Amino acid sequence: MRTVAGPEAGALEARARALAVLRIRSTALAVALLPAAAAVVLLAGSATGSIGGSQDQGWTALRWVVTGGALLVLLLAAAVAAVVVRARPALTPTVPIAEETAPDLYRLVRDLAERLEVPAPSAIALTPDCDSWLEDRTHPAHAHRREHRDRGALAVEETRPARSVRGTGGGPGPATGADRDRILDRPERRPPQAPVLVIGSPFLWWMRVAELRALLAPVVAGTGPSVHPDIAAARRFVRGLDAAVAVAARGRGCEPPSGPASALVAAVRRPAFAFVGWVARLLLRGCRDHAAAMERAVAAAASERAQSVDYGLRIVAQEQVGLAYAGWDRLLTRVALPAWRMGRWPSRLDAGVVAALTELSRRDRLAEGFTSRLSERPACDLLEEPGAMDEATSLLAARLFHGGPPEPGPDWSPVDWGAYPEEVVDRKWRQEAARLNRLLDEREDTHDRVGATSAPSSASAPVPPTLARVIDRLTADAADLPADPADPADGSDGPDGSDGGLDGGAPRLAARLSVEVAREEAAATRAHGQGPAAGAEGPAGGCGGDPWIDGFAPAFPLQPPRTGRELLADHVTAMVCCAAVDTAGATPGLDWLDGPALLVGGRRRADLAHPVLSLVEDGDDGPLRAWLGEVGVRPEKPVRLV
């Protein structure tokens, strides 16, 4: 008995699991055809006189019942098969890279595939994430027409002689160019297409060329099993089932169009989609274990095949993956997210991750020595226009992680890192300070209206927006908190979302801030969703707006919504920073790892969080007043608002 080891063992295991998945598909097809086979047997036996007779009422009724049941089963099976085949599988949003814009990158991938003895990926794309993978995009909904084929294709289709085509000249003859295209475009004659190589954009900017090649080696090695007909067919079947489940869920949840036939449409649509979803989930459960084992075997075979290519350098590259992930996460959550909330999107996120990781290397002893790599050639040099690619992936990152519009506009404009402190940090502080003072003015107006019946007074002048006013209000509210146990002390709102006209201290103010911020975000979301794609059908073919198309919600939110106390602390911090800028000569700045920063004398002050929390949570203004005195801030002076 011969023992198989190495990549061939993983490939054989993957093919065995793929055949198991295909057997489940064949079994489902056989079950759907079984009633039709029984009906054919009964009809043939009746015609030949072998089963029953033409005058036998019992056999006649049985034939009609079986034939009707067979037709119904065939109709249901055809409906399920049509949904599975036509449903569009999930597609990762990426930025495609044409070969003309990155010839060196395509050459590197081709050489790597040649060394691994596997087919080259069909194309390359970038994603704003710290990961790389192969993605099959051979579904007809994803494929372009041959005359509009992706210019970034790596795998060049070889010209092969086509068989003769009958019908145009009265006999067999050589096929013309159009006939040859029709022959090659038939699914049964089309060779398996290699998947698309998706590369995380932070890798291109942080890693060196040799590190990127070592990191992509096991990924590119996966194209070998991917183009196997059995594995490709099994993957298509599983993806079709998954997409059918999504179509069924969307179809059951959407509302039918208004009209006299809406009730009939709903009565037919929902049970039909429920049946399709039930069948698709049943088949998915049956092939789930085999599909998972097939993917593990494919990964094992690819990893084993890539052992011979830059194995030692791959260990170093894996260390850089963890570092890039940490820097990318901090850059998105601390730096990019505040800008996105302001309606601006940083246009050089990938270049920013290099600055963030360099700063991390400077601060962290464990990262010492990583900056010495910067003298080597970065992988982004493999692109002809790295700035344009960086801008495209930055816009896609804002689309994915924040739910912004798909294209720049008046309320969604790019910002450079040099202008970030003035256009994002300073503007953010001014807007939050203005919101905080506006809510304080509304509360004072409410109290004035409540006491106007007992003690009418003349109209008072508007209160200037000062930091001292905010501090005094929070300390006074903390001292005069009502002892009513029914009063919500956790920052929640009243039944109508307001504070009910009561002076409930910091929790009430935090609740009002939560309502105000949620209202502004909802208005911005509606403004972004008023494009022509609003309400269009999603990728899965269902009804209703799709988050990726309409921008109603981010696909992958970075952070949960901020609580009321967090919002209040952020607004008080913004008020303090505005006062420091206006009265103490401080300036807004950018910290690559922590986001907006206050610079006093050219150095960052990172000790403001504790005094602000003491004021917001405990009503103790001592630490904050000591900090203000140390910096030289004059809280009684009005601050400039937007």
Image (cartoon, rainbow, N blue to C red):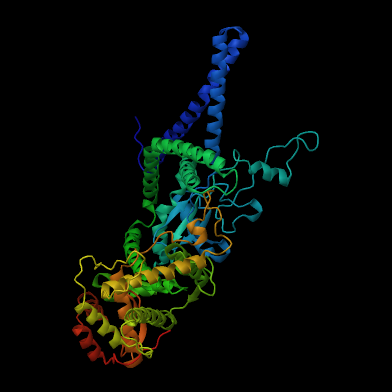
Nearest the camera: 242 or 290?
242
Q: Farthest residue in the right direction?
A: 170
Q: Position of residue 485 (x, y in %)?
A: 20, 66
Q: Quadrant of residue 216?
A: bottom left
Instruction: Evaluate whether residue 182 shows in this view.
Output: yes
Q: Is residue 103 above or below residue 429?
A: above
Instruction: Evaluate whether residue 378 shows in this view.
Output: no
Looking at the image, which residue is at 36% across and 84% down? Answer: 588
Q: Quadrant of residue 294?
A: top left
Q: Farthest residue in the front direction?
A: 454
Left or right: 502 with respect to 252? left
Nearest the camera: 371 or 331?
331
Left or right: 542 with respect to 608? right
Q: Is residue 58 above or below residue 523?
A: above
Give the mark count. 0
Q: Is residue 563 above or below residue 438?
A: above
Q: Quadrant of residue 362?
A: bottom left
Q: Position of residue 552 (x, y in %)?
A: 47, 61
Looking at the image, which residue is at 28% across and 71% down? Answer: 565
Nearest the camera: 491 or 201?
491
Q: Position of residue 549 (x, y in %)?
A: 52, 59
Q: Is residue 378 above or below residue 171?
A: below
Quarter of the image with the N terminus is top left
Quarter of the image with the C terminus is bottom left
Q: Position of residue 173 (x, y in %)?
A: 76, 37
Looking at the image, which residue is at 35% across and 65% down? Answer: 561
